[in-house]
Image (spheres, grey):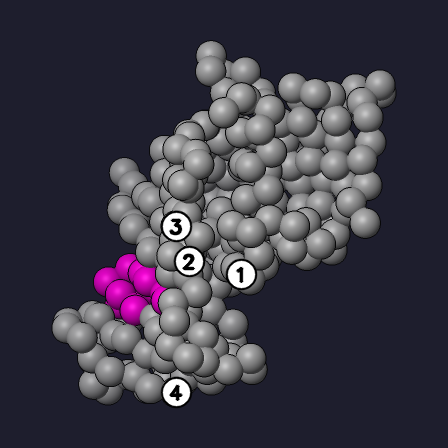
Amino acid sequence: MNTVKLFSVFFAVFFFGCATVPKPTANEAMSADELRLCLAQTTDSLKDFSAEGSITIHTPTMDQSAGFDLAARGTDSIKMSVYGPFGITVGSALFTRHEFTAYNALNNTVYRGSPEKQMRMLPFVKEIPFELLTGTLRGIYFFLQSSPIDSLSVNAENSLSFTISNSDGSFDKLQYDGGVNRITRCTRRDAGGSILWHVGYRYKRNVDGGIVPEQVEVNVPLKESTLVLDYDSVVWGSPQSPLTILFPEDAEIVTIE
């Protein structure tokens, strides 16, 4: 696969810590409301950060990796740059809930349009909700506070599993680790019980004792496709540089309708 095609897949995937929060104990006494509060405390503190690492995509037709750096602000504004061999910038992308802009440095082309429209064009990621992909880049599952918790059971010390139902008839099975106060796995099944996707999160402690993402893996079984993000460094707090995409004046502009 040539590098232009590789970057096209990489920026398409865009649609698809040292935070101080109380460390809960996941036991029989924890209620659904208490769990929801613990998760809210975590996600509220992890909105702004910068990271570097590598991104890998496995599909029946591709098995490729590249370096990345990214900066995130709020809950839905992310800028990500992808690097090829020798640190050459292949391209950059900036997206929010309502807008997507990507610059492919290899063909000097800027792509603009709606994130949702871009996702629907891509078989690998069109089944994955925007919030899941936003969280994936941040290395955390953003649990929506409006989601009803249908069941809650104890797996082991500091470990819980619970289920939530979605309006379209699908349902999610999630695992929660109280030691890191994070959801560490989520599997979504359709109304018939077939797996649509599952995602796993792995964490580690940095030199300051803070909890940071180490790896996120998203798998779409029906597509035989997997996206893996490995984080080499993570810094919490607002990024120093503005979240903007720079490109030459002679770049071709393509609007995705």
Identify the secondary structure beneath mark 2.
Answer: helix
Estimate how packed mark 3 is, as few (under 14), some (14 to 19) or many (20 or more) residues with alpha carbons within 10 Å.
few
Q: Would you say the residues marked 1 and 4 are in contact, meaning their CB atoms lie under 8 Å apart?
A: no
Q: Amino acid at mark 4?
A: Asp
Could you tell me how far apart the alpha carbons at marks 3 and 2 are, in whole angstroms? 6 Å
Identify residue for label 4.
Answer: 150
The tag on residue 224 is: 3
Q: Which residues are magenta?
A: 175-187
Could you tell me how far apart the alpha carbons at marks 4 and 3 are, in whole angstroms? 30 Å
Identify the secondary structure beneath mark 4.
Answer: strand
Mark 4 or mark 3: name the one nearer the start of the chain: 4
The structure residue drawn at horizontal position 72% and vertical position 40%, both measured from the top left corner, is 101
Q: Position of residue 192 (x, y in %)?
A: 42, 79
Q: Position of residue 91 (x, y in %)?
A: 62, 27
Identify residue for label 2.
Answer: 222
Identify residue for label 1.
Answer: 127
Q: Would you say the residues marked 3 and 2 are in contact, meaning their CB atoms lie under 8 Å apart?
A: yes
Judge whether 135 appears above or below 155 on screen. Answer: above
Identify the secondary structure beneath mark 3.
Answer: loop
Could you tell me how far apart the alpha carbons at marks 4 and 2 are, in whole angstroms? 26 Å
Mark 1 or mark 4: name the one nearer the start of the chain: 1
Residue 182 or 86: which is nearer the viewer?
86
Could you tell me how far apart the alpha carbons at marks 3 and 1 are, in whole angstroms? 13 Å
Mark 3 or mark 1: name the one nearer the start of the chain: 1
Could you tell me how far apart the alpha carbons at marks 1 and 4 are, in whole angstroms? 23 Å
> From the viewer's perspective, is 179 left or right of 4?
left
Q: Amino acid at mark 3?
A: Glu
Q: Closer to the observer: label 2 or label 1? A: 2
Give the residue furthest to the top: 86
